[in-house]
Amino acid sequence: MDKADILSRIQTSLHERFGLEVDQLGESARLRDLGVDSLHVVEIMLDLEAELGTSLVDLSFPPNPSLGEVVAVIARNLAGDA
Amino acid sequence: MTSSRDVVITGMGVVSPVGCDMEELVSHLSTARSGIRLCTPRGLSKTFPAGVVPRTFTDVFTKLELPTLDRCQQMAIIAARQAIADAGLGDFSAYKQRAGLYYGTVRGGAETEQNWYEQLLVERKEASRPFTIMALMHNAGAAQISIRHQILGPVMTHSTACASSGTAIGEALRAIRDGYIDIAVAGGAEAPLTPAVMGAFDGTRALAAPDKSDVGRSCRPFAKDRAGLVLSEGAAFIVLESAEHARRRGVPCYASLAGYGVASDGYHIASPKAEGEATAMRLALEDAGLMPAEIDYVNAHATATKGGDMVEANAIHMAFGEAAKTVPVSSTKSIHGHLMGAASVLELMITVVAITESFLPATAYLDEIDSQCELNHVANSPIFDRQIERAMSFSAGFGGTNVALVVSKHREMAAKRPSIPVLSK
């Protein structure tokens, strides 16, 4: 799964679970500006883990990450580099 | 730190089976119209009478907010918001630590808790969704109100069973009087109409069955044919501040909160004791500097259980002496049921309405008074055009905590009534 796929899945999850509009959810959008906190992120990660049938080991994000930074951390997990 | 004995109520807000605003509440009280309906909790085969708030609140919150908000907290936020706006306030941050929030609940986020246990025990999940604990913890309602309105002083949660919001209000009163804070939002919330809570209460064999002729008349406190309590959901809050503070803000008040008495039975986990109840009443009178004969109305706790109502009638006789023969008494649970953690605050609010609207709210469906509950009952219909200067609301909780609160008409400050539009700051 490439970064574009991961972003797309996160966008879908944020839209379906929390009602955020997909056009707000570009790579540069920062979570705090979207009203998304760390527990919302955990919720999304649980969706992703269930979908991919895997466990994301390292979810240490930088402070107030952008969606692009979240995607990068997940990609690193999936590549086994976490 | 300044202390003041004179504490007033400047805001009220309510979400209840008998109204989701003050105007609707007054309308129900003035017609003794019941808000008790049939309720079949999901997964149970039994149907109960219950005080249902007939709407959902999910449209009031965003989908980002909802995962942390059990129905209990949704109602708490809405009722507190009403009370705060009614007092002409919104954001308390300028008060720093001199504004407080005093909250009461018995079961907190009961539905969220049950959903998690279903996941744990039925679906065999080993960890919950991330927001579960934030939505089920007892202090969540208090915290949500504090965050939304920037109440930065004491934010306290009381769990004294069905006296919870009464002790919350009483302790807020003391904190203002003793000079620790200038203003407080106080009240409670409960959302117990879940299978787990209803089933657990049904286990006590204390719940009423639906009345066969009219479910609305299932709760009959003090009646010879009373058949048990009716659980209800809802939330109610008041804003309390020192009279001096209200004057400085230029706002009117509904009434003074003149007395608080709290006393525990030390007797039994479920059975009440008249001595403990009477002591709380006496202490509240003493705190207000009043004699029993000066009280013009008592809003009783009476839940319509066989034993509880008798004990309370006895307690009123013990505390009021001769005046028990004349002081008008009613239990408005007959129309709104038992809101548990929100019961005490709702009933205090009704007691305030009795003062501002000059009428005695009734115990509905009291066709035949139990001879063991002899009091001067306001039976079936409200009594209008009755000047009420001072009144008491009483609440008792499982475990034996008893609370009495005394309110009185304020003689100097501008009087506020529920029908008066909200004043802006």
Image: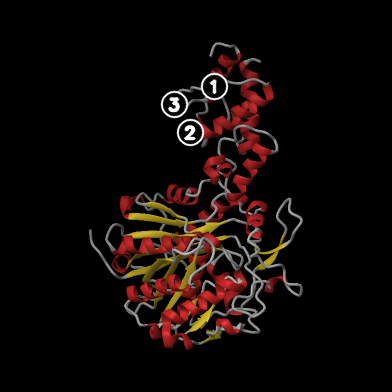
Which of the two labelled residues, at mark 3 and mark 2, occupies the earlier sequence position? 2
CA gap, disc 1 and disc 2: 14 Å
- Label 2 neighbourhood size at 10 Å, few (<14), some (14-19), many (20+)? few
Q: Residue furthest front?
A: B267
CA gap, disc 1 and disc 3: 13 Å
In this rendering, is residue B166 above or below A16?
Answer: below
- The residue identified by callout 3 is A63
Name the residue type under label 2.
Arg
Chain bearing mark 3: A
In front: label 3 or label 2: 3
Disc 3 secondary structure class: loop
Rendering coords of residue B268 (x, y %):
50, 63
Q: Are marks 3 and 2 on the same chain?
A: yes
Disc 2 secondary structure class: helix
Chain bearing mark 2: A
Disc 1 secondary structure class: helix
Rendering coords of residue B1 (x, y %):
23, 58
> What label sits on residue A68 in the rendered view?
1
Q: How many marks?
A: 3
Residue B257 seen in render: no
Q: Are marks 1 and 2 on the same chain?
A: yes
**What residue sits 54% from the left and 17% below the top?**
A72
Chain bearing mark 1: A
In the figure, residue B17 lies in which quadrant? bottom right
Left or right of A70? Residue B406 is left
